[in-house]
Image (spheres, rainbow, N blue to C red):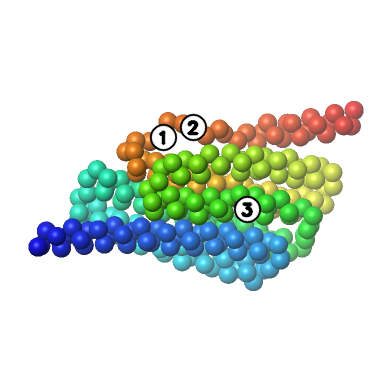
Amino acid sequence: MTSEHIVKSYDDELSRLNREIVEMGGMAESQLAASMRALNEQNDELAASIIEEDDKVDELNFDIDQFAVQLLALRQPMAEDLRSIVGALKTSSDLERIADYAANVAKRVIAMDDYPPARLTAGIPRMAVLVQPMIKDVLDAYVAHDAEKAMEVWHRDIEVDDMYMSLFREFLTYMMEDPRNITPCTHLLFMAKNIERIGDHVTNIAETIYFLVHGKRMREHRPKIDEGDSVVTTLAGRDKLKG
């Protein structure tokens, strides 16, 4: 009887860990969606509230870390249980960074108060539209321990990288065309980079899920973005037009 009670309590603890991961993921996803609303509406109050909410994500991340370490120390898990707890630690860290990047976008919204270039901002929400369902889908895969779904999300990140490079070239072109665009486009470039990094952390979570399910790390590697090549390509294109 005692043994059954111990096992059930252990299951309850693992379930609590998963629930807190999902809660944290929901908060991070909401932060990104809210930052896009703040950008579209140039809403400083909403942006400020997003920055404040980031503290709650940090606190939950700390709680998850503490609880996971406690489980490791008291339960001394093996095999799949050990992978689940270590995976929760890694996933929590990635979700905390996702929320940080969403807060960084909100900070840039506030910084753009004196520069409302509506025609320039449209690409940022389009990029977020790609990333937001990736967060939701990878969390669903985490709960279900669905490695196949996690890998499907992992492969979608290439679309985010492609859009980021497209926006990078677009903003660079605007900056070269008119020096007045330099400051707002710099802020927008940072926003785009933050969203691209969110996509990277989603793929980290997908790789963690793969490890949870299969007990080994992925062998496939993601292509790397080379922003330097994009700068050279854009400048070369500009010079060709001038010629």
Q: State the residue lying farthest toward the bottom.
A: 45
Give how far across and how far down residue 19 sits, in percent: 37, 61
Mark positioned earlier in the residue sequence (3 or 2): 3
Would you say residue 93 is visible in this rendering? no
Query: In the depicted view, which residue is nearer to us: 92 or 48?
Result: 92
Is 16 on the left or on the right of 39, as rendered? Answer: left
Q: Which residue is at a point 71% across and 44% down the rendered structure image?
A: 167
Amino acid identity at mark 3: Val
Gap between marks 1 and 3, in whole Å? 27 Å
Mark positioned earlier in the residue sequence (1 or 3): 3
Q: Which type of secondary structure does the marked residue at label 2 adopt?
A: loop
Is 111 on the left or on the right of 5, as rendered? Answer: right
Gap between marks 2 and 1, in whole Å? 8 Å
Q: Does residue 92 lie above or below 204 as drawn?
A: below
**Mark number, residue 218:** 1
Query: In the depicted view, which residue is nearer to us: 13 or 46?
Result: 13
Q: Within the image, what quadrant is residue 165 found in?
A: top right
**Mark number, residue 221:** 2
**Category of crowding for the residue at label 2, using alpha-carbon neighbours closer than 10 angstroms: few (below 14), some (14–19), many (at least 20):** few
